[in-house]
Image (tube, rainbow, N blue to C red):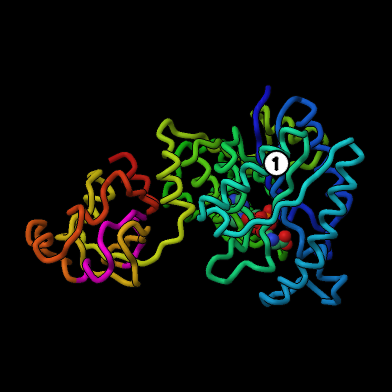
Amino acid sequence: MYGRIVVKIGSSSLTSEEGGLSRDKVRFYAGELAELKRSGRQVLLVTSGAIAAGFRPIGYPSRPKLVHEKQAAAAVGQALLMQAYQEAFAAHGLAAAQILLTRPDFSNRVRAQHAMRTIEELLKHGVVPIINENDTVATDELKFSENDTLSALVANLVKADGLYILTDIEGLYTADPRKDPDAKRIGQIDFISEDLYRIAGGAGSAVGTGGMRSKIEAARIAMGGGVATFIGRVTEPGDLAQAAGGSGRGTYFTTSLHTLSSKKQWIGFLSIPQGRIIVDEGAERALLHGGKSLLPAGVAGAEGDFHPGDVVEVVGADGSTLGRGVTNYASWQLIAAAGLPSEEAIRRVDVHRVEVIHRDEWVTTHVLKEAEIHE
Ligand SMILES: Nc1ncnc2c1ncn2[C@@H]1O[C@H](COP(=O)(O)OP(=O)(O)O)[C@@H](O)[C@H]1O
Ligand SMILES: N[C@@H](CCC(=O)OP(=O)(O)O)C(=O)O
């Protein structure tokens, strides 16, 4: 039972009733991870808890809500969080390393490569990499805000065999069990549809930020990268090993055979789009269901200042996001060529390819409805 696994522990699993960091819980999870390591696995931890650990020492009466207050609390708390983990892992003879990342660290290939090499080196030496968002420098537009997405990007980056998102609930239910007592747990999910997002509500606790929605999104990103994902609860010794063995208390998301190439993973989930292209209904169908490239005839408009080679977001006539791709047109060229038949478009503007986005450089991020998946 070897392999590389990423474990994400959410704020709701690490805090005491008053919202502060629980050192007992840190010790418990370190023990669970140490057990997995002893079974021969490589383990990476993505952990929240910096704000929880820091808000009291800085002098806030409760968990702050304003961005600059959260950033200040995280700056105090991250050091305390690491101290707690380092002590807890040391009790098992393990060294731990701190890695703080932001979204641009994934979108920039050179930075991502450096992060990956550092992680590989740490794993080679048996160190447990402990990852959190670098809250101090994360800007509003590019912030993860919850750590679910971060954990999926880390799992894809290190080509993990599994992602384990630990939370305060035993997986995904047919409705938020805090609100609906008849809600039933879903044991296994093979594809993610829009219907699934509909049953997922926001955060259930005062400290959690993402709720089930962001966990499903994380599972979708991980599945795209070929990483099987578990969302569930780990409270007793041995629970994590049981989850890793396939019989945990939670929901398992399987991976499809059609995982995206690393280029498409980058386009779909890691890149930062430089603008938007609005397409008509015909082009929307061609992109979502026809496996076709986007031609100038289907373009209704363009927003932002982008250049050939940039990644752009594509939206439908109703404003919903369809996906992302690499544009062969600059924004000004596309405005001039929008709606034109291909021959006329290339007479008007000087582009090296007639397709606005070639199908090989397109990734659908729009979540399909259950019925559309079986179409
Ligand atoms: N359909 C659902 N199934 C399970 N939990 C749900 C669902 N909808 C909303 N939730 C809520 O999501 C919460 C977990 O998310 P969150 O509080 O953000 O945790 P974390 O801090 O671990 O990221 C649960 O406690 C639950 O109340
Ligand atoms: N990065 C911050 C906040 C992250 C957070 O709360 O995320 P989550 O546990 O996924 O709801 C922290 O360490 O406190």
- Helix, strand or loop status at disc 1: strand
Vertical comparison of 84 with 273: above or below: above
Nearest to the observer: residue 309 or residue 256? 309
Which residue: 79% across, 32% down? 238
In the visual, does 274 lie left or right of 91?
Answer: left
Residue 173 visible in the snapshot = no
Quadrant where the image shows the C terminus? top left
Instruction: Say which residue label 1 marks.
Output: 44
Viewer-side residue, 281 vs 298: 298
**Quadrant (top left/top right/bottom left/bottom right) for the N terminus:** top right
Give the residue at x 54% y 65%. 142
Whole-percent x and y of residue 99? 71, 52
**Relative to 237, 99 lies left or right:** left
Residue at the limit of the structure toward the top, as seen here: 1
Q: Quadrant of residue 72?
A: bottom right
Instruction: Count the labels in the image.
Output: 1
Q: In the rendered image, which quarter is residue 258 located in? A: top left
Please provide percent x and percent y for residue 189: 50, 38
Label 1 neighbour load within 10 Å: few <14, some 14-19, many 20+? many
Q: Which residues are magenta?
A: 319-335
Q: Quadrant of ligand 2?
A: bottom right
Expressed as whole percent of the image width and height from the top left, the position of residue 85 reads: 84, 49
Reply above or below: 24 against 301: above
Work out whether 325 lies above or below 156.
Answer: below
Residue under the image location 42 percent in, 30 percent down: 257
Magenta stretch containing residue 324, yes or no? yes
Q: Is residue 21 magenta?
A: no
114 to the left or right of 368: right
Looking at the picture, which amino acid does disc 1 mark?
Leu
Give percent across and percent down for residue 281: 21, 60
217 to the left or right of 280: right
